[in-house]
Amino acid sequence: MRTTSKGILVLLAGLNFIFIGQCTKDSGRGRDKIYAEYPWTSASDTVTIQGSRCTISGKAFRVFGPRLPGVGLVTLLNVTTESQTELPPDVRADSMWIADKDSVWVKQIEEINQHKSRSGLSLEVSDGPTWQPGDTVNIVVGLRLNDTTYFLSLPDLRIEAHGGR
């Protein structure tokens, strides 16, 4: 049985945009069956896009503090090219999957805050599931150029806790 819950994504940096996200939790199906439905097997920790070799790094955290009862997961990712090569100008992240042991948080292009530079792409999604600090997540980002999507993975990223103000 699959149940789906909706979440709200609020972009940071002073912008007041609100988007809807989705977290899919599968009951009793197990991690292998969940992962079979998403692009985990076709993802790699490096991809080459028009001669630019790309890698991904990042952080996932939850914010806690006196005025914050524990906001949802925030994920900050950096897609960078090696050897100072330029990322093709039309490359965009068009999808992101963030999974814990039994659920997947799915984000689409309009839900990903993207900042592009000559040699990389910074990605931010926030207000995600309330997975706990210390848990690990696996992330796959779909990078799109023209009609091709390249799947870049960041496995076993540990969720950190940050104090709020």
Image (cartoon, helix red, strand yellow):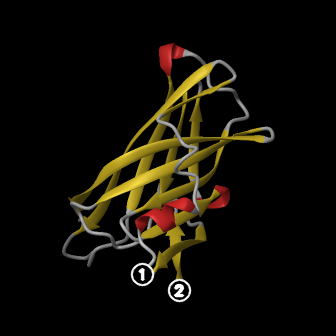
Question: Quarter of the image holding residue 147?
Answer: top right
**Quadrant that contains the C terminus:** bottom left
Q: Residue 1 carries which label?
A: 2
Q: Closer to the camera, 13 or 53? A: 53
Does the CB distance between marks 2 and 1 fall below 8 Å? yes
Could you say whether the residue bearing mark 2 is in a helix, strand or loop? loop
Q: What residue type is labelled 1?
A: Gly
Q: Closer to the camera, 65 or 62? A: 62
Q: Which residue is drawn at 51% across and 47% down?
A: 123
Q: Residue at x 52, y 51 (%)?
A: 40
In the image, is 15 to the left or to the right of 160? right
Q: Which residue is drawn at 66% across and 59% down?
A: 110
Coordinates of residue 20 in the picture (x, y in percent): 60, 73
Q: Closer to the camera, 146 or 104? A: 104
Which is more N-terminal, label 1 or label 2? 2
Question: Quarter of the image holding residue 108?
Answer: bottom right
Q: Which residue is drawn at 42% across and 81% down?
A: 28
Q: Closer to the camera, 112 or 97? A: 97
In the image, is 37 to the left or to the right of 100? right
Q: Is residue 144 above or below residue 97?
A: above
Coordinates of residue 35 in the picture (x, y in percent): 50, 61
Does residue 128 appear in this view? no
Q: Is residue 107 above or below residue 154?
A: below
| Residue under pointer 1 | 28
